[in-house]
Image (spheres, rainbow, N blue to C red):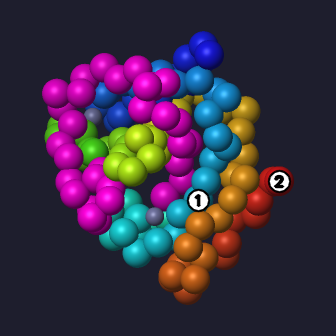
Amino acid sequence: MSKNLHASCHCGTVRIALPSEAAGVLACHCGDCLKTHGNFNAFLAAPVADVSLDGAEALVWYQSSETSRRAFCGTCGARVLKEVTPTGRWLISAGLVDGPTGRRIIKNLWEQSMPDWYDLPSVVP
Ligand SMILES: [Zn+2]
Ligand SMILES: [Zn+2]
């Protein structure tokens, strides 16, 4: 799979490439995402082995639950990714992708814990 999606943090230190065949955009409304992102988290999920990462030394890791940890850029604070330990997948923040993704939100997660100040994003099946 060619890594034809490119993502970077705000300061450009952390750069990611992943295949666009990665799953579509997922929107997570769980309490952990709200607290760490400040709002819901839209991400692209891909197996760790399919993702190239430059600038990994700038990442600060935070264990956000028993089964997952999250990484943000220590310079600019951009929330870069969440690692789901049991599945070996990285959930790359969709907003970091440079240029069009060709993808849409395909699923909402944890709608039951979303706050009352926005409407659920529409989903393209
Ligand atoms: Zn940065
Ligand atoms: Zn979440």
Q: Please rate how many residues cluster around mark 1, counting C-alpha atoms within 10 Å: few if below 14, some from 14 to 19, many from 20.
A: many
What amino acid is at disc 1? Ala
Which portion, as a residue range, is magenta? Answer: 41-70
In this picture, is 124 found above or below 24? below
Mark 2 lies on a secondary structure that is loop
User: Farthest residue toward the right?
Assistant: 125
Question: Along the horizontal axis of the image, is 80 left or right of 25?
Answer: left
**Image coords of residue 20 (percent x, y):** 64, 27
Mark 1 lies on a secondary structure that is strand
- Marks 2/1: CA distance? 13 Å
Question: Along the horizontal axis of the image, is 20 left or right of 110?
Answer: right
In this picture, is 116 found above or below 72? below
Residue occupying the point 61% across, 53% down: 26
What amino acid is at disc 2? Pro
Q: Please rate how many residues cluster around mark 2, counting C-alpha atoms within 10 Å: few if below 14, some from 14 to 19, many from 20.
A: few
Task: Please name the residue that numbered disc 1 is placed on.
Answer: 27
Residue occupying the point 40% across, 75% down: 31
Q: Where is residue 53, by image quadrant?
A: top left
Residue 109 located within the stretch drawn in magenta: no
Q: Is residue 119 visible?
A: yes
Numbered badge on residue 95: none
Task: Please name the residue that numbered disc 2 is placed on.
Answer: 125
Which quarter of the rendering shows the N terminus?
top right
In this picture, is 106 found above or below 28? above
Residue occupying the point 45% across, 41% down: 89
Residue 63 located within the stretch drawn in magenta: yes
In this picture, is 4 found above or below 73? above
Q: Is the magenta stretch mostly helix, strand or loop?
A: strand
User: Farthest residue toward the front?
Assistant: 86
Question: Along the horizontal axis of the image, is 61 left or right of 125?
Answer: left
Q: State which image quarter holds ligand 1.
A: top left
